């Protein structure tokens, strides 16, 4: 079995939700800053509604898919 540094990182796509990435991870933001999470699995926001962007805070659950009004 390969060591942790030799095996590829697993990324799981959650339809309508975040990308789940085996951590630790570094994310390079639009402005070039780097943010790091050392968690075992990291939820990366894909809807940009998160108050803790680039990390998911489950804000996507408050509304339907982007552009859709739930009422």
Image (cartoon, grey):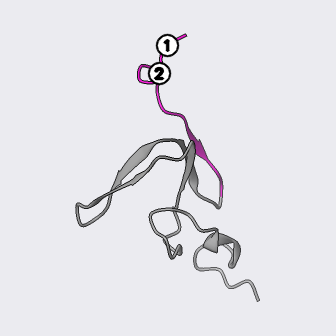
In this rendering, the answer to whether 48 lies above or below 21 is below
In this rendering, the answer to whether 21 lies above or below 52 is above
Residue nearer the viewer, 28 or 39: 39
Tell me the residue that label 1 is attached to. 2
Graded by Cα atoms within 10 Å as few (under 14), some (14 to 19) or many (20 or more), the crowding at tag 1 reads: few
Tell me the residue that label 2 is attached to. 7
Q: Which residue is drawn at 70% across and 72% down?
A: 61
Q: In the current view of this chain or complex, which residue is farthest to the left? A: 32
Specify the principal SS of the magenta part.
loop
Count of numbered circles in the view: 2
Element under disc 2: loop
Task: Say left or right for 17 vs 39.
Answer: right
First in sequence, mark 2 or 1: give its number.
1
Tell whether label 1 touches label 2 (CB within 8 Å): yes
Question: Looking at the picture, how far across and down is residue 54, in whole percent?
Answer: 44, 63
Q: In the current view of this chain or complex, which residue is farthest to the top? A: 1
Task: Say left or right for 51 vs 68.
Answer: left
In the figure, residue 40 lies in which quadrant? Answer: top right
Which span is picked out in magenta?
1-15
Say which mark, if any, is on residue 19: none
Q: Which residue is drawn at 56% across and 63% down?
A: 56
Q: In the current view of this chain or complex, which residue is farthest to the right? A: 71
Question: Looking at the picture, how far across and down is residue 25, in whole percent?
Answer: 42, 45
């Amino acid at each position: 079995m390969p060591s942790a540094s030799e095996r590829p990182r697993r990324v799981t796509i959650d339809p309508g939700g975040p990308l789940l990435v085996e951590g630790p991870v570094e994310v390079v933001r639009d402005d070039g800053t780097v943010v790091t999470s050392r968690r075992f699995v990291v939820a990366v926001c894909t809807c940009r509604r998160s108050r803790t962007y680039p990390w998911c805070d489950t804000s996507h659950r408050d509304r339907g898919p982007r552009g859709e009004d739930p009422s």
